[in-house]
Image (spheres, rainbow, N blue to C red):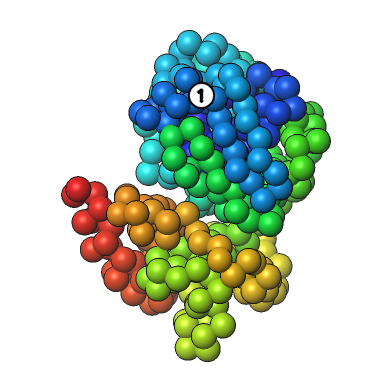
Amino acid sequence: MKIAVIGAGGMGGYYGGVLAQRNHEVTFIARGAHLRALQQNGLRVKSVFGDFMVKPARATDQPADVGPVELMLFCTKSYDTEEAAELALPIIGTETSILSLQNGVDAAERIGRLAGMDHMLAGATWISSAVEGPGTIKQASDFRRVVIGELSGEITPRVRAVQEAFSGTGVAIEISENVQGVLWAKFIFIAAASAFGSLTRLPVGGFRAVPETRALMANLMRETEAVARGLGVRLSTDAVEKALAFMDSSGPNIKASMQLDVEAGRRTELESIVGFIGRTGRELGIPTPVADMLYAVLLPVELAAQSR
C-alpha cells in the first residue's frame, strides 16, 4: 500500500516505521532537522518491542512530490491540523483514505472540511512514543493499539484494507462500528492523564493513587463523559471506571504527550484537550468546573510557550 504519514513525530514515526518494515511504500512528511536526519540516515526506532531501522527512509517536506496515496496517516499535533491538511491536499486522490490518529475527538471533521469528508476514517490509538532526537523515535509503552472505523459505523472494504495493512506489524488493530464512542472513551482517559501529568510533572504512577488527586481526576472524567453523552455519543455505562482501570494498569513511568511538551517548554494541545471540554460543555449547557479550573491553571504555561 502507498502510504503518506503526515507528521513524523513519536506516533507517526513509529507507525510509519512498522508499516515500512512490512514493505509498504511509506513516505514521511516532516520538516527541519528531523527531516534532514530521515533523509540522510533513515529512521531509527528504539522500542520496548525491539529496535529497528528504516534505511533508506522516504521523507520530504513537499507533499506534491509524493503523488496520490492510498492511505494518509494524519499524526500531527492538533494545533497544526488545518495547516497540515492544506499542505496535504496534493496527495489526496479519488481513492485516498485519510485516517487521523491525533489526540482529541474532532480531528476527522476538521480535516474533512478541507479534504472532503468522503475521504475520512476515524481512529484512536494508545501508545507512548516520542521523538528522542532528529531521526530517532523512542516507543516506551507496553501497549500499541489502534482502533479504526467509518464515521457512519459501516464495515467497508477500505476499513478492512487499513486493518490488513497493519497486520503483521505487532500493532493491535481493531475495527469498530462505534468509533466515536471509542474516541471519547480514550478522550476521557487522555484528558485526565494530560492535565494532571502536566500539572504535577510526574509520571502516571506518581499521581494516580493519591486519594485527593484521584478524586479530582475522576470528576474531570465524569465531566468529559457528560459532554460526550450531551453530544449523543454512545458510551458504556462504566466508561469512567474503565478509564481509571486503564490508568491503573499503565506502566508507572508513562507520561502523556501533552505533559512531555509542557516539560520541554513547547506549545501543547491544551486547547483541543482540556479547553475543548469546557467550550463544548458551555455550548451544551453542561457544567465543567474541574476542566475550567485545570484550563485556567495551565493556560499561562501554554501562553508562555507560544511567546518563546
Instruction: Give the number of callouts.
Output: 1
Question: Of all residues shown, which one is farthest toward the bottom?
Answer: 211
User: Is residue 60 placed above or below 34 in the rendered structure?
Assistant: above
The location of residue 97, given as percent across then percent down, is 63, 27
Residue 84 in picture, x, y percent from top left: 42, 30
**Residue 234, how many percent across, how many down?**
67, 60
In the rendered image of this protein, does residue 47 appear above or below residue 294? above
Can residue 283 be seen here? no
Image quarter in which the N terminus is found: top right
Q: Residue at x 41, y 23 (%)?
A: 36
Q: Nearer the viewer, residue 2 or 232?
A: 2
Asked which secondary structure carries label 1, the reply is: helix
Q: Is residue 268 left or right of residue 185?
A: left
Tell me which amino acid carries mark 1: Asn
Q: Residue at x 47, y 83 (%)?
A: 213
Q: Nearer the viewer, residue 239 or 21?
A: 21
Q: Quadrant of residue 202?
A: bottom left
**Could you tell whether 57 is left or right of 32 in the image?**
right
Looking at this view, is 238 or 42 the one in front? Answer: 42
Please tell me whether residue 7 is drawn above or below residue 212 in the rendered image. above
Asked whether 119 or 205 is in front, the reply is 205
For image coordinates 52% across by 85% down, the residue present is: 210
Dot 1: few (<14), some (14–19), or many (≥20) neighbours within 10 Å? Answer: some
Residue at label 1?
41
Residue under the point 34% across and 74% down: 293
Asked if one can make out residue 196 in the rendered structure from this viewpoint, the answer is yes
Q: Quadrant of residue 250?
A: bottom right
Residue 235 in the image: state x and y as whole percent.
Answer: 67, 64
For residue 239, above or below residue 262:
below
